[in-house]
Amino acid sequence: MKRLNGILLPHRKRTESRMTEDLPMPEIVRIPMLMHMGAPCEPCVKPGDPVTVGQKIGSMIHEFSAPIHASVSGKVKAISQYQTQNSKLVPCVEIEPDGLQTLYAGIRPPKLETKEDLIRAVRESGCVGLGGAGFPTHVKLNTTNQIDMLILNGAECEPYLTTDCRLMTEAADEIIGGVCLLMKLLGIKETRIGIEANKPAAIAQLSEACEEFVDVKIVPLPPKYPQGAEKVIVYHTCGRVVPEGKIPADVGVIVMNVSTCAFIYRYSKTGMPLVTRCVTVDGNAVKRPCNLRVPIGAPVGELLEFAECDMDSVHQMLSGGPMMGQALYSTDQPVTKQQNGLLAMKAAKKVHATACIRCGRCMQACPLDLMPMELERGFRTKDVVSLKKHHVHLCMGCGCCSYVCPAKRPLAESIQLAKLLPGTKGGAAT
Amino acid sequence: MNQMLVSASPHERAPLPTWHIMLCVLLALLPAAAAGCVNFGYRALLLLSVTVGTAIFWEFLCRIIMKREQTVGDLSAAVTGLLLGMNLPPDLPLWQAAVGSFVAIVVVKQLFGGLGQNFANPTVVARIVLMLSFTADMTAFRDPNTDAVSSATPLVTGASYWDLFLGNTAGCLGETCALALILGGIYLWLRGIISPAAPLSFVGSFALCTWLAGNDPLSQVLSGGLLLGAIFMATDYVTTPLTAKGKILFGIGGGCLTFVIRQFGGYPEGVSFAILLMNLLTPYIDRISMTKPFGTTEPREKEVRSDA
């Protein structure tokens, strides 16, 4: 089988053998009402209200969304405005923790007997894709397509990040428990778990945990970025091609991050909604890189402090990995549901774009066989016809083209901007 | 605390800038250039210094006059200069060499917008211009063994395989030593700078045509500028196709054209003309050899056609 293109990156997984630690209680948590793909939630608490862990504080006003719960017990200090990383202004519930972590009274394991039960429970849990994109999980599960394959994404192909690797090593049983639950309730026949071959410990632990299940298969993937991209992992684990403009469900597949799957299992046992998550704290300004279990909404500055980061040398902070992560603008910004990494980087040499030499490296790196240099030119000249001809909307923004470009051209950035030009949507040229 | 830098992803870049690629090409050319200097003496070294020096100078001057960002540092002018020097007879008058680098850098490269914008290989065009302008000087080849100047290359005189392989023959400065050229090509291939598709298909198709025509393919491949052209000029990023399929088409076209010109043409040497013609065809080859993006059903070319 043909392998899709990709690039070899330095892995820099310094935290892969560190046990996950708990972050000490932060002084304040700020919980934005948009931590998922879709519509923002509406706050359902007022300043001064007491809240408890797991209490709903943001309710869905649209089906394509996910509710939001308090991650600490304490008092609502204010409802402020928060600017997300893509510049949307959303309400944000600020909670002053009392340190007691009192649990919300209404927390009990959900009744899970049918597919509808599962989807309702997942919707109530506030679960979103924990791999980074934050797609509401109940929307993904509530498909009318016939699904026969569940693919768990344990690729974790970004440098530095190791939260999924730690989860697979520390809690393989939870992942397999989640797999069994999903397979039973959704009537899925087969599961494949894709893991980059650079995580032998994770592969060993998971293989042991799923030994007795014949229809769960571990697929080692080449350690080549971006193995974790949805279309890439679907193709490399089961050989199915997700056609242009379609989603994995259209080829009978549901793709889910390993940590999302483990969360669904934990929720089925405890009924505790999504209020904490694991974050890798690393980067060349961090002295003690670590994996932290963090209440959602904790300020990133406190994580960096815990990891003994030299704040004076930090030049850039990233939410996520270096390839697809987004730059943070302040240490007060909260940890969100989708954030799998927090990197603090020292000042790097400024990159300076020079002329394209047509070396073709961007093309050879593109996992989807696009022509990034043509797309960049199409963006510069605002040539919508050419952008459509070269399938601009297929680009998933993995950044391989920018990474390899010897002229340091901003290819991935231009292509993302090109997708916003009017008239580029809507498939092939007409 | 510092102001945080907010920039678009990816936040890491590969440590291979343009000047590094050009430096690798310079390194790969060095063995053949050195072999030329050994065979033809100090005059060869002088000629190379002149072509490299003037190429850098023209680039520098051009960028100043055009009020553009200075690009001498990307080393592409140095590569063009060295490659041009290697394509000239070692005894060419130095002022003619300077004219050659003017044509390459100013006329072919900078007037079209600089690196990446030229449609033809600067070295190839400069060589052709010199050939047509100073035919006598451009065809006065010195035999390194006897130092006798003759007007014929081994293409027409014939020489032993071993002499051809080591470069112990008359010819252009950097094209005679097949061994050094092949070593340079292998180095570039191993470093991931060039793909072997174009050189192999170029040499392969040429050898096949020569054999079919009843000539000796090995001596034809080893003599003249074939290896220099196939390894270093048919792999120029700017003026050759992008995809592997396109590169193979380019190589086959170049090989066949070289054969036709050598066999039936008035000039003894056809590599430069073949490469120039293929350079002109490159945009069309690119069109018919585009890859199909993952998950799409129609190849891009069909859509391009239906639009036209």
Image (cartoon, coloured by chain):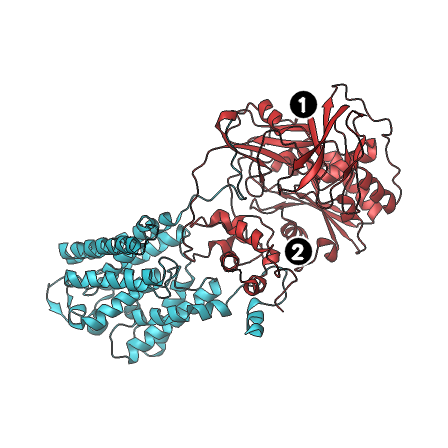
Indicate the quadrant containing the N terminus of chain A: top left, top right, bottom left or bottom right. Answer: bottom right
- Chain identifier of the red chain: A
In the image, B10 versus A2, the foreground residue is B10
Any part of residue A101 in sight: yes
Q: Residue at the location (19% across, 61% down)?
A: B97
Residue behind mark 1: A26
Give the image quarter of residue A305.
top right
Crowdedness near tag 1: few (<14), some (14–19) or many (≥20) residues, C-alpha within 10 Å? some
Residue behind mark 2: A239
Q: Residue at the location (75% across, 36% down)?
A: A263
Give the image quarter of residue A308.
top right
Could you tell me how far apart the alpha carbons at marks 2 and 1 are, in whole angstroms?
Answer: 45 Å
In the image, A52 versus A236, the foreground residue is A52
- Chain identifier of the cyan chain: B
Q: Residue at the location (55% across, 58% down)?
A: A370
Asked if marks 2 and 1 fall on the same chain, the answer is: yes
Q: Are marks 2 and 1 in contact (CB under 8 Å)?
A: no
Chain under numbered label 1: A
Q: Residue furthest bottom?
A: B264
Q: Is residue A245 above or below residue B287?
A: above
Q: Amino acid at mark 2?
A: Gly
Q: Is residue A282 above or below residue A412?
A: above
Say whether residue A24 is left or right of residue A321: right
Give percent across and percent down for residue A77. 73, 25
Any part of residue B176 in sight: no
Q: Which mark is residue A288?
A: none
Crowdedness near tag 2: few (<14), some (14–19) or many (≥20) residues, C-alpha within 10 Å? few
Give percent across and percent down for residue A185. 84, 45
